Amino acid sequence: MKVKIVAGVLEANDRIAANNRRLFDDNDLFVINLMSSPGAGKTTLLEKTITALAGEFRIGVIEGDIATDADARRIDALGVPVVQINTGGGCHLDGNMVRQGMDELPLSDLDILIIENVGNLVCPAEFNVGEDAKIMILSTTEGADKPLKYPLMFQESSVLLLNKMDLLPYTDFDLEKARKDSLMLNGDLEIIEVSCRTGDGLETWLEWMRERVGSRVVTA
Amino acid sequence: MHELSIAQSILDILKNEAVTNGYDSIDSVTVEAGEMTGIVPASLELCFEIAAKDTVAKGSSIEIVMLPITASCNDCEKDFDIVGRAFECPHCESTSFKVTGGNELRIVEIEVPDKTEGAITV
């Protein structure tokens, strides 16, 4: 007997993400889900962002990694609350893992929660965790073919940070192609060129954060 | 890479359907997945088979129907499928378009054994 059913495969995750979302809202938290390949610069961006915004906002971090607490230690050194989630081989964070991390953080004492996802251009894009915005990094050393090869993350993200712009002269990275293909996949994508190493372009990113956190407080 | 999580999510839905409707076993499940999801069918089949052990879906088959990435051209306004990651309108060669589909991931049908009548236990 054939039975027609229509069920989103990830609806259980979406339900958990919606619950996370309610908790974030209850605590007036602005939440970003930061995604990229391994080594694109997520943790360095985080360090720079926290250092620059620490005087204006109270920031907390959930660090997702397959193993080790190396990233959490880097964030901990900046004096902000951080919780490390080790997925033990899992290639992404899902709503439930983030929920467990949230329980370890003083949510009501925070303005911004940054969730650093597992380094991976594919799987994290599939799993909502209740965030306000997905932010992704593509670095110039990875190549401009990535948007078309890994379209979902580009489609899901609100902001694309093109990192390692200081290395551009030493690579064959086709900046125009990367921009064009990314916008083709997602016309609303905000593209910001940065170098986390030199700090170039970071002010534009920080302004984006300030504006979004600010508008969130006003509408809340 | 995320096929095991997805297989487990499918099984959770199947277990729930079985409990709600009183199915003792499930013969097959049909899943639609958009090309954008990056699902590798062979990998999902294997993960499903492994994860289904000791569940109501033990031994059931999984059919995965891949759906194309679809787009609507901003210039000639025609709809088209994006084949082989050739991100260009086949009608007017424009590269300005909106992606309209391809990230689906849903169960559309399950097959369960027909209910046998007369086997009433008192």
Image: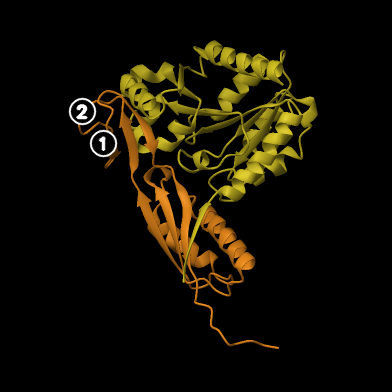
Chain colours: A yellow, B orange
Give the residue at x 41% y 27%.
A186
Q: Residue A205: image x %, image y %? A: 54, 16
Q: Residues within 10 Å of mark 1 (few under 14, many from 20)?
A: few
- Quick one: A172 or B55, which is closer to the camera? B55
Q: Is residue B28 above or below residue A188?
A: below
- Quick one: B99 or A185, which is closer to the camera? B99
Horizontal side, residue A7 vs residue B63: left or right: right
**How many circles with numbers are drawn on the protein?**
2
Protein chain holding label 1: B
Quarter-of-image position of residue B104: top left
Give the residue at x 56% y 23%.
A45
Dot 2 or dot 1, earlier in sequence: 1
Please identify the quadrant where the C terminus of chain A is shown.
Answer: top right
User: In the rendered image, is residue A84 in sight?
Assistant: no
Query: Which amino acid, mark 1?
Result: Ala
Q: Residues within 10 Å of mark 2 (few under 14, many from 20)?
A: few
**Residue bearing the label numbered 2:** B93
Q: Which mark is residue B86?
A: 1
Q: Secondary structure at mark 2?
A: loop
Q: CA distance from mark 2 to mark 1?
A: 10 Å
Q: Residue B42: image x %, image y %? A: 38, 59
